[in-house]
Image (tube, rainbow, N blue to C red):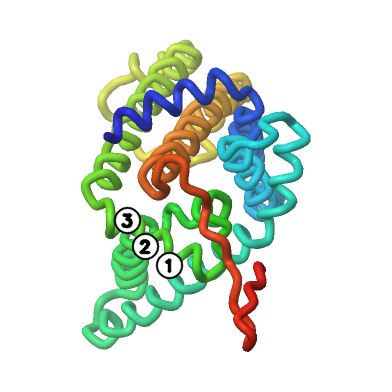
Amino acid sequence: MVLESLKEAFARLKDTPVLWITGLFMGALFALFLLTQAGGNTPLGSRIFFLGLFALPFFLGGFYGAIRGGDPGLRGYIRAGSRYYFRILLAGAVIVAAAFLTGFLVMIPFTILGVPLQAGMSLSFLGVAIPFAFFTFFYDTAVVFEERKVIDSIRRSVEFTLGNPKRTVGFYLVNLAIGFLILLVSSVVWSFAIADRLQPLVDSNQTVFQMNLTAEQMMTIIGVPGLWAGAVIGFFAVLIGGTLLLTFKACLFRRHALTPGAEAPQQGEFDEKGRWYRY
């Protein structure tokens, strides 16, 4: 059951503190990106974001390695992160490249039919991104829990999703509900934090309230304290939500991909004399 995996995720978060390292990284990345973008330093924000994406596979490898067992401490986290870094990075890059290529091919018919370029790009890439994310979401867990190689991990994710359609749909629905709840709570807390800044807009007449405000005008109204409040609240929202989602995902995959007590499949091949060589 999906809810059993969720209960297990809460238990693992309590018993394995090292798991929060990945959430801390993602929360800090989000806060830095928000501060640089809202502060007008878009190039720096973009660099931070892309460097963070390149570093993320290390934290994912350490995260899943801690859940898999062995050494759930900091040393085991670092060891697993280093071991699985390139496989997770390359598999993610293959998925993104394939999604962009597919989106480009899907966009061609829209262009021939005379659909505006921007609308065609939005429709094609959105239509491609959702199914790609749905079927390949478990590729990184396959890398760590089953020692899969780059392409094989993507295939395994698709296989797991097709083999467990009700569980994966339930998993996504539960995560959407949790994400909505965290977003709602974060928005309410931030609204209270900047209530004094927004009061002039609330008290203004209908004409002023309905005018289109630019990003610079909104930043002026919110101010630096409001921006920092949003970054801090966003940090904790991503920390809690991201850590819970990854733990939930790992528990679901491990519970239903492998039978209890079974070992992860070993990758290798037989030579011409019938001898087994593990990769």
Asked if marks 1 and 2 touch (Cβ < 8 Å), the reply is: yes
The secondary element bearing badge 2 is classed as helix
Neighbours of disc 3 within 10 Å: few (<14), some (14-19), many (20+): many
Give the position of the C terminus as an image quadrant.
bottom right
x%, y% of residue 188? 39, 17
Q: Secondary structure at mark 1?
A: helix
Q: CA distance from mark 1 to mark 2?
A: 5 Å
Q: Residue at x 32, y 78 (%)?
A: 106
Crowding near the residue tagged with mark 1, few <14, some 14–19, many ≥20 C-alpha atoms within 10 Å: some
Residue appearing at x 65%, y 67% in the figure: 278
Q: Which residue is mark 2?
A: 158
Q: Amino acid at mark 2?
A: Val
Residue 234 versus residue 40 in the image, above or below: above
Name the one closer to the observer, 27 or 95.
95
Taking the spot 29% from the left edge, 66% from the top edge, the residue there is 123
The image quarter containing residue 105 is bottom left
Depth check: 12 or 39 in front?
12
- Mark 2 vs mark 3, CA separation in Å: 5 Å
Is 115 or 4 nearer to us in this picture?
4
Which mark is drawn over residue 155? 1
Q: Gap in Å between the C-alphas at discs 1 and 3?
A: 10 Å
Q: State the residue position of label 3.
A: 161
In the picture as drawn, the residue positioned furthest to the right comes out as: 75
Residue 68 lies left or right of residue 9; in this view the side is: right
Relative vertical location of residue 133 with respect to residue 13 in this rendering, above or below: below
